[in-house]
Amino acid sequence: MSSEKLTPKNVLIVEDEAIVAQDARMALEKFGYRVTGTVDTGDAAILAVKKERPDLVIMDIRLKGDMDGIETAGRLSEGSIPVIYITGYGDKETIDRAKKTCPGAIVHKPFDDQELYSAIELALYTHEIEDALKKKNKELEAANRLMVGRELKMIELKKKIKELEDKTSKI
């Protein structure tokens, strides 16, 4: 194992129940994550994400304020930050709504520290892989455009060669 220390991942907690937020903070810190803050509304979460740029957001589905956690996560997904929902609600309608935001996981309250840790690690790893795939896809698209451009030039050159051959064969 390397003696090199990894930079801890930054996590924002969005939870309106103070005791749950404190439990999540203690679990995250125990596993070496850096908690960038704890907020209790969707609006505060959006501001905190813009300010702190966390690597991951732990999001309660039911929040204080006008926006619930699912709507908030939907707005955050534009910034490509993985979200893990923690919730006491597991009904089909809630889960179906949550799925549309492509969460890293859904962890049910009361959560187990190890379950939360596993969900975070999988969400971060999946996000890392997705980012790498997006980058490779962009590189492939650029290479494809280059190849198509060269192919078009080759076709044009072949046409010109054919025209010249036709002219010289008439001479």
Image: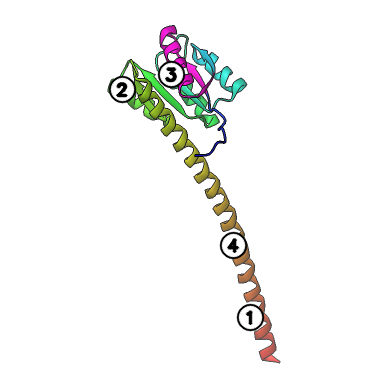
**Residue neighbourhood size for the residue with mark 3, other residues' Cα within 10 Å, grouped as few (<14), some (14–19), many (≥20):** some
The image shows residue 109, relative to residue 104, as above or below, that is: above
Look at label 2 and name its amino acid: Glu
Secondary structure of the residue carrying numbered label 3: helix
Distance from disc 1 to disc 4, alpha carbons, whole Å, reads 22 Å
Q: What segment is highlighted magenta in the picture?
A: 11-35
Q: Secondary structure at mark 1?
A: helix
Q: Quadrant of residue 19?
A: top left
Q: Earlier in the sequence, mark 3 or mark 2?
A: 3
Q: CA distance from mark 2 to mark 4?
A: 47 Å
Crowding at dot 1, Cα within 10 Å, few <14 / some 14-19 / many 20+, comes out as few
Q: What residue would you read off at disc 2?
A: 93
* For marks 2 and 1 on the same chain, the one whose residue lies earlier in the sequence: 2
Give the percent coordinates (x, y) of residue 60.
42, 17
The CA distance from mark 2 to mark 1 is: 65 Å
Indicate whether 51 appears above or below 132. Answer: above
Crowd tier of the residue under label 2, counting other residues whose Cα lies within 10 Å: few below 14, some 14–19, many 20 or above: few
**Mark positioned earlier in the residue sequence (2 or 4):** 2
Q: Residue at x 56, y 48 (%)?
A: 138
Looking at the image, tell me whether mark 1 or mark 3 is earlier in sequence order: 3
Tell which residue pokes out farthest to the left in this image.
91
Give residue 29's position: percent from left, percent from top: 49, 19
Q: How is the image coloured?
A: rainbow
Q: Which residue is mark 1?
A: 162
Closer to the chain start, of discs 3 and 4, is 3
Q: Which mark is residue 147?
A: 4
Q: Which mark is residue 92?
A: none
